[in-house]
Amino acid sequence: MIEIYTDGSFNNDNLINDNWCGGVGLVLRVFDDVSPMELVREEFYALRYTYSDLLWFSSQCDGSDTITSTLIECIAFKEGLDKVLQHDNGHELIKFYVDDSLTIKVVNTYINIMLNGGDIA
C-alpha cells in the first residue's frame, strides 16, 4: 500500500513574476506488501513555485490566469500522483489524503469521467 499526503499554499501578496509565491508539501509512505502495517519507506517533498509557474499551471487547467488556493491544492495532488506513479507497480492500494474539499470533488469528477470512457456521465 502507498499513502500520499498532500498540501499546498500560496502567498497572495507575492504574486510578482519571479518571486516564490506558492508551494506544496508531500509525504509519501510505502508499506510492505506482505505485512501491510510495516512501513518500508517514507519520503518528504517540498516544491516551490513562482507566479509564472502558477500561471502556467492555471493555463493548463482552464486557460485562465487566476491563482487560487484550490489550484495550488490541485498542483499538490498532481505532484503527489506523479510521485506515486514512480513507485506503484500497478497492484498497489493507493490512499490519498487531501484537505481541500473542492480538490476532492475535482479528482472524483476526473475519476468518474475516466471510468466512463472520457464521457461526462
Image (spheres, helix red, strand yellow):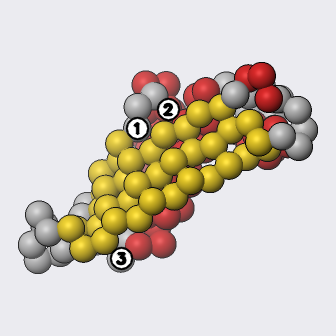
**Alpha-carbon span between mark 2 and mark 1:** 8 Å
User: Which of the pair 60/53 is nearer the observer?
Assistant: 53
Relative horizontal placement of residue 87, taking residue 91 as reference (left or right): right
| Quadrant of the image containing the N terminus | bottom left
Marks 2 and 3: in contact by CB < 8 Å?
no
Q: Earlier in the sequence, mark 3 or mark 2?
A: 3
In percent of the image, x 88 and y 43: which residue is there? 18
In the displayed structure, 100 sits above or below 6; it is above
User: Which of the pair 26/89 is nearer the observer?
Assistant: 26
Q: Which mark is residue 89?
A: 3
**Alpha-carbon span between mark 1 and mark 3:** 22 Å
Q: Which residue is mark 1?
A: 98
Q: For the residue labelled by badge 2, is the local secondary structure a helix, a strand or a loop?
A: helix
In percent of the image, x 68 and y 38: which residue is there? 22
- Image spot of residue 87 (x, y percent): 41, 73
Q: Is residue 3 at all visible to an observer of this figure?
A: yes
Q: Which residue is mark 2?
A: 103
**Alpha-carbon span between mark 3 and mark 2:** 25 Å
Q: Earlier in the sequence, mark 2 or mark 1?
A: 1
Q: Where, by quadrant of the figure, is residue 76 drawn?
A: top right
Count of numbered marks:
3
User: Which of the pair 84/21 is nearer the observer?
Assistant: 21
Marks 1 and 2: in contact by CB < 8 Å?
yes
In percent of the image, x 45 and y 28: which residue is there? 100
Q: Nearer the viewer, mark 2 or mark 1?
A: 1
Looking at the picture, which amino acid does disc 1 mark? Answer: Val
- Image spot of residue 73 (x, y percent): 55, 36
